[in-house]
Image (tube, coloured by chain):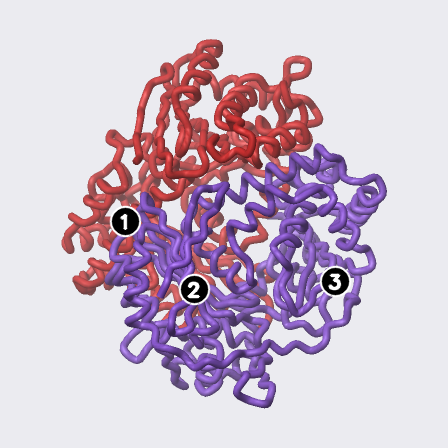
Chain colours: A purple, B red
């Protein structure tokens, strides 16, 4: 099995890509002076995958909302104890997360790297679900869902996604609902497991103080050739138009929170590196703390520095540009964002603003490579979206103002915008 | 390789450098320490962010932000924390190491100068902070205090600490009250600023991929001009007696209730027994193989999180959990039962070994992150000796079963805070 070296000419680092005979994709990013090593074993399977078709079966199957996240919790248990108990013997700090389009199991450790990696490779490939353990988990995840019900940041985002998307499952809470998870059975978990946790659908990413050869030896031992079938994500057709312009919910908060989003074109393929870079830079130009928009919103006392943020939120079958923060008047914020975008379309982006933004975004992306945690997480999400880490950094250094201007023409169109607001429960509460 | 350097700038001001070229960034921080005092905490706490708004060279927020963007997206941030009964105010900057800039610029040199400028030469108008900057900062501080209420887990923890330490400086919120922030005037901040640079205990730190000499030189020059006076003394009172358990319940329209239990451990840094309390806390509720995780969450299925955290500066231990209202008492009972198990020594040698491995792993991993390394050394500022992560790990590994039991038996319940959700299921 050959190691394919990928070197970043600007950052001077090298990482390795391996196509393992089992079907597993492996990325290893050595950092020889690092004290710790960070490893992720993940699958292209997230909360949006509750309808799918296997290449070896004719029919589409639908499963309960929240099942990918439930499966993540349950995989930690096996017939002879749970994975945390095994990690306890190596000292590794272990965890897992489920996002919209992937499920990842991870650990970070400063010693006993090999033993920790063995545990990771083994437990993720050893499912064990029973009626009793599924029932117990319904109580724990039920409390996780209740915790998120009280989380205004979480609610304001899902309310926005509900206002933007008619059918796409990105609008559904990652953990599902107390009701939806009550339909989860051991059989359904096994079914999803054997569909999505096939090594052809998975990747292993490791950054830190480790030799590639040592990793490959362990993978040879723990990963056996998997069945070569593919899984197709099935989504109902999503109209281009949004659902509604505004959505409001009252929660126990002191100041209103908002998310203002533009629904963007999204096909079945993920956006290219170039398109992503353009969107990231465009947002930096439009709304960073150095921008005229930020200044205007701040002087009008409509936003604050600690909460205002923005992102290009993109995944399989969905893409949107989202501005978020706290504001006494979210409608006015939305209004000024629209006006500023229209102004920039008309007057053009000043060259110095573009150059400044480019340096800022470039610098932050290079700086992110300090962290083994960031590197491993980037490698896996980039693999699942068919992108490459260093070409992203190169594209940032090479992008042109013309490309950003073209991006501005097609993004952030007013007719596709929606506003989500979390208001205080009246009358206004006052904290102690 | 890591090189740790320590020098004196002037009376009450020292300089610590942790140079490490494997990082792609460098970090400089200036940290001010003062005793927490209800009368002036708000003025001090607002200051760091106020100073980060503008400088003489970059006289408004936009111009300063533009400069930071040009410096490859460097960050300039302010932070306010409590280190026991001491207020810790920090201003820090992180930038790209010079070797990674596209056109050969020196970001570290520029950032060191910028930091000196914003701290020592605020853009005053008529001898004080400018009205416009001042109004912005006060508004935003009030909004930040409000937003702490939005996260009920953090809010409940703060409430428990306030109630538990109501007669101690630690019980005062880090920004004081909303009212005291609103009552501030520009001159209050100016006075606080003057006292801060002349009287506070100060530590300057540089970390990562940069040459510390340059930074040291800039700050030495700046402090010569300031002229330091007597440095304040910072001390923390560790309460060892609990006269009566405080029980407070507050209703709120939320789905999930929060239970926070505050304990006195009677032991705080730099006492030698501190390592045993750290280890005991990890075994009790600090890891996913701890007693609280395995019993309150996994066995009884009562919650998603139930954790124990030890504040070694203040000598207190907090247990936090989010539960259904009807399960609050069941969770409380089980938490106390598990503490009792610790007190009676009902734990295996494997539990001790696991907690040791886990703590040592956390210590060693911290050195791969500049922010965590800064915090590692800065929080030891009042200790007689500075420990490296390796030395702290050694100390943890020497803790015995008897010392863990002893530590658990010092832990005394002080306060039970319940944030009671009134929303129906």
Q: Residue at x 76, y 46 (%)?
A: A405
| Callout 3: chain | A
Q: Which residue is mark 3?
A: A247
**How packed is label 1: few (under 14 Cα within 10 Å), some, or many (20 or more)?**
many
Please provide percent x and percent y for residue B119.
Answer: 53, 22
Q: Is residue A342 above or below residue A87?
A: above
Quadrant of the image occupied by residue B146: top right
Distance from the alpha carbon under mark 3 to that under mark 2: 32 Å
Look at discs 1 and 2 and give the one toward the viewer. 2
The secondary structure type at the circle numbered 3 is strand
Q: Which residue is mark 1?
A: B278
| Callout 1: chain | B
In front of the other: A68 or A419: A68
Please provide percent x and percent y for residue B94.
Answer: 49, 34
Please provide percent x and percent y for residue B387.
Answer: 25, 36
Do pointers 1 and 3 mark residues of a single chain? no
Q: Residue at x 60, y 47 (%)?
A: A395
**First of labels 3, 2 by sequence position:** 2
**How packed is label 3: few (under 14 Cα within 10 Å), some, or many (20 or more)?**
some
Distance from the alpha carbon under mark 1 to that under mark 3: 47 Å
In front of the other: B254 or B132: B132
Quadrant of the image occupied by residue A293: top right
**Residue B406 seen by the camera:** yes
Q: Which residue is mark 2?
A: A96
């Amino acid at each position: 099995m050959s190691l394919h070296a990928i070197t970043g000419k600007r950052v001077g680092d090298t990482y390795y890509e391996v196509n393992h005979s089992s079907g597993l994709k492996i990325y290893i990013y050595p950092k020889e002076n690092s004290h710790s090593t960070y490893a992720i074993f993940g699958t292209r399977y997230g909360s949006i995958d509750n309808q799918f078709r296997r290449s070896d079966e004719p029919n589409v199957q639908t499963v309960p909302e929240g099942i990918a996240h439930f499966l993540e919790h349950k995989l930690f248990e096996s017939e002879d104890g749970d994975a945390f108990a095994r990690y306890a013997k190596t000292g590794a700090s272990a965890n897992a997360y489920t996002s919209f389009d992937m499920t990842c199991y991870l650990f970070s450790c400063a010693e006993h790297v090999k033993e920790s990696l063995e545990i990771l490779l083994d437990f993720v490939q050893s499912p064990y679900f029973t009626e009793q353990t599924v029932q117990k988990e319904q109580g724990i995840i039920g409390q996780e869902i209740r915790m998120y019900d009280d989380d205004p940041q979480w609610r304001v985002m899902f309310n926005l996604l509900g206002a933007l998307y008619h059918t796409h499952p990105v609008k559904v809470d990652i953990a599902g609902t107390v009701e939806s998870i009550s339909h989860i059975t051991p059989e359904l978990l096994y079914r999803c497991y054997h569909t999505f946790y096939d090594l052809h659908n998975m990747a292993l990413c490791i950054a830190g103080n480790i030799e590639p050869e040592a990793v490959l030896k362990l993978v040879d031992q723990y990963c056996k050739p998997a069945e070569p079938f593919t899984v197709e994500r099935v989504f109902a057709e999503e109209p281009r138009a949004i659902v509604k312009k505004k959505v409001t919910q009252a929660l126990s908060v002191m100041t209103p929170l908002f998310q203002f989003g533009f629904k963007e074109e999204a096909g079945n393929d993920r956006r290219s590196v170039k398109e992503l870079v353009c969107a990231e830079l465009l947002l930096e130009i439009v709304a960073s703390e150095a921008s005229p928009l930020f200044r205007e919103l701040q002087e009008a006392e409509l936003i604050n520095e600690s909460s205002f943020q923005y992102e290009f939120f993109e995944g399989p079958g969905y893409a949107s540009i989202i501005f978020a923060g706290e504001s006494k008047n979210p409608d006015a914020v939305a209004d000024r964002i629209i006006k500023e975008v229209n102004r920039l379309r008309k007057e053009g982006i000043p060259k110095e603003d573009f150059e400044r933004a480019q340096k800022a975004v470039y610098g932050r992306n290079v700086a992110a490579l300090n962290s083994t945690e960031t590197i491993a997480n980037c490698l896996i999400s980039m693999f699942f979206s068919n992108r490459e880490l260093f070409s992203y950094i190169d594209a940032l250094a090479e992008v042109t103002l013309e490309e950003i201007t073209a991006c501005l023409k097609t993004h952030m169109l007013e007719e596709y915008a929606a506003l989500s607001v979390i208001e205080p429960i009246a009358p206004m509460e006052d904290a102690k | 390789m890591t090189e740790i350097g320590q020098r004196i700038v002037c009376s009450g001001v020292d300089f610590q450098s942790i140079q490490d070229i494997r990082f792609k960034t460098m970090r400089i921080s200036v940290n001010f320490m003062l005793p927490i005092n209800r009368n002036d905490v708000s003025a001090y706490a607002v200051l760091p962010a106020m100073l980060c708004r503008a400088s003489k060279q970059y006289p408004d927020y936009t111009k300063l932000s533009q400069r930071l963007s040009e410096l490859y997206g460097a960050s300039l941030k302010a932070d306010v924390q409590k280190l026991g009964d001491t207020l810790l105010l920090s201003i820090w900057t992180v930038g790209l190491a010079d070797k990674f800039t596209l056109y050969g610029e020196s970001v570290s040199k520029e950032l060191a100068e910028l930091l000196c400028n914003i701290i020592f030469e605020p853009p005053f108008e008529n001898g004080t902070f400018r009205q416009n900057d001042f109004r912005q900062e006060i508004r935003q501080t009030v909004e930040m205090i409000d937003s702490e209420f939005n996260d009920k887990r953090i809010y409940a923890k703060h409430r428990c600490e306030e109630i538990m330490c109501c007669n101690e400086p630690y019980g005062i919120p880090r920004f004081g009250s909303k009212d005291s922030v609103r009552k501030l005037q520009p001159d209050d901040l100016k006075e606080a600023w003057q006292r801060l640079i002349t009287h506070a205990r100060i530590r300057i730190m540089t970390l990562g991929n940069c040459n510390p000499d340059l930074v040291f030189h800039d700050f030495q020059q700046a402090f010569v001009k300031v002229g330091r006076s007597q440095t304040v003394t910072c001390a923390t009172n560790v309460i060892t007696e609990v006269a009566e358990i405080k029980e407070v319940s507050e209703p709120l329209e939320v789905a999930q209730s929060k239970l926070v239990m505050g304990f006195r451990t009677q032991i705080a840094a730099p006492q030698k027994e501190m390592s045993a309390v750290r280890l005991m806390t990890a075994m009790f509720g600090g890891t996913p193989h701890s007693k609280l995780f395995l019993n309150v969450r996994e066995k009884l299925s009562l919650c998603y999180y139930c954790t124990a955290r030890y504040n070694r500066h203040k000598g207190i231990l907090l247990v936090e959990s989010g539960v259904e209202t009807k399960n609050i008492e069941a969770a409380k009972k089980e938490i106390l039962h598990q503490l009792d198990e610790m007190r009676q020594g009902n734990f295996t040698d494997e539990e001790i070994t696991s907690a040791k491995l886990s703590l040592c792993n956390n210590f060693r991993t911290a050195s791969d992150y500049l922010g965590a390394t800064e915090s590692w050394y800065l929080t030891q500022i009042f200790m007689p000796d500075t420990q490296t992560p390796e030395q702290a790990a050694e100390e943890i590994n020497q803790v015995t079963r008897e010392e863990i039991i002893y530590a658990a038996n010092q832990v005394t319940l002080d306060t039970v805070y319940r944030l009671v959700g009134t929303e129906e299921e």
